């Protein structure tokens, strides 16, 4: 058995698997997958570690580029779905305590940094898993967005939708709920992430705020009003 999952993931796993389907939810399908894939395809990566791989969808995508994937996740019910994939190597575990070789040329965190309670230990382990010169590719919810949770969009007194943010500098775990999923996300100011990554001597190679491509125009317009996602690529010194 995994140690806890008081963060809600065990109880939310089956709804999460339904929400992702084959193509991922809105944010993955229409916003993040394409720019994440663009950082992977044709780069010559051989071995990737997906930290917080969930039900394994992004491991399966990376395999299309001929990459051998290892996925790690503490939620047994998600990992059981991932393990239906015969080509991947999947391991039960947490970022903070994972025990992997320092041999990966690519480490991916696809919307999992917000799930890791001890982020400092988690990032240290991700960096340790990279070979010198290796790449850490991160998709994350922006800190501006997590500072607006759990309410997100609300209607002001005039009936206009607003997305208020508050207590930006205060790190905290926030319960968020939708469609049978109830999980904890961590809010941390952007400087917390940047400082931890810079303190490992990593070099920032890409920073982007991807916008929707395709998808429902009305939903895309709402998405463009608020900072949602960022992608960062960091390189470990050779
Ligand atoms: C938002 S989901 C993302 C899953 C997958 N990367 C994707 O994009 O579909 C976050 C994942 O982080 C996992 N997780 C929770 N705590 C974690 C930890 N301490 N270390 C690594 N992963 C964790 C959860 O089990 C969940 O699968």
Image (tube, grey):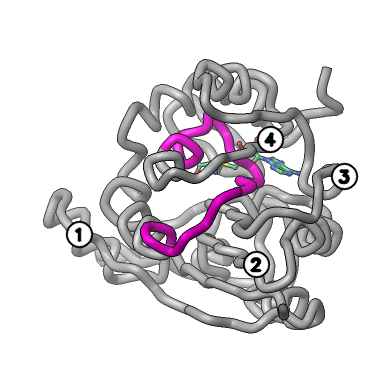
- Range covered by the magenta-colored residues: 40-60
Disc 4 versus disc 2: distance between alpha carbons? Answer: 21 Å
- Pick whichever of labels 4 and 1 is earlier in the sequence: 4
Q: CA distance from mark 3 to mark 4?
A: 11 Å
Residue in the picture at 52% in, 32% down: 56
Q: Which mark is residue 97?
A: 3
Q: CA distance from mark 2 to mark 1?
A: 29 Å
Q: Is mark 2 within 8 Å of ligand 1?
A: no
Closer to the chain start, of discs 2 and 3, is 3
Q: Secondary structure at mark 2?
A: strand
| Left or right placement of residue 87 versus residue 5 in this view | left
Percent from the top left, x then y, of residue 192?
73, 75
Asked whether mark 4 lies closer than 8 Å to ligand 1, one says: yes
Which quarter is ligand 1 in?
A: top right
Q: Is mark 3 within 8 Å of ligand 1?
A: no
- Decide which of 20, 205 is in the foreground and name it: 205
Image quadrant assignment for residue 114: bottom right
Q: Which residue is mark 1?
A: 213
Residue at point 62% right, 24% down? 79
Question: Marks 1 and 2: in contact by CB < 8 Å?
Answer: no
Q: Which mark is residue 73?
A: 4
**Label 1: element kind:** loop
How much space separates mark 2 and mark 3, taking CA atoms? 20 Å
Relative to 42, residue 206 above or below: below
């Amino acid at each position: 058995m995994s140690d806890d999952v008081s963060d809600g993931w065990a109880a939310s796993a089956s709804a999460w698997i339904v929400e992702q389907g084959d193509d991922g939810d809105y944010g993955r399908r229409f916003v993040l997958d394409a720019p994440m894939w663009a950082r992977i395809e044709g780069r010559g990566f051989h071995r990737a570690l997906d930290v917080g791989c969930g039900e394994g969808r992004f491991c399966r995508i990376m395999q299309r580029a001929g990459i051998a994937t290892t996925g790690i996740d503490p939620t047994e019910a998600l990992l059981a779905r991932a393990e239906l994939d015969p080509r991947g190597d999947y391991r039960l575990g947490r970022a903070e305590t994972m025990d992997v070789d320092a041999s990966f040329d690519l480490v991916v965190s696809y919307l999992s940094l917000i799930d890791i309670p001890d982020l400092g230990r988690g990032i240290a382990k991700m960096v340790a898993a990279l070979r010198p010169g290796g790449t850490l590719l991160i998709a994350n919810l922006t800190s501006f967005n997590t500072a607006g949770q759990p309410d997100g969009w609300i209607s002001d007194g005039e009936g206009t939708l607003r997305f208020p943010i508050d207590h930006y500098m205060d790190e905290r775990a926030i319960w968020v709920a939708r469609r049978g999923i109830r999980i904890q996300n961590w809010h941390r100011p952007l400087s917390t992430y940047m400082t931890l990554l810079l303190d490992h001597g990593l070099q920032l190679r890409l920073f982007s705020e991807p916008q929707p491509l395709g998808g429902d125009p009305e939903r895309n317009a709402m998405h463009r009003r608020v900072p949602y996602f960022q992608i960062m690529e960091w390189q470990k010194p050779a």
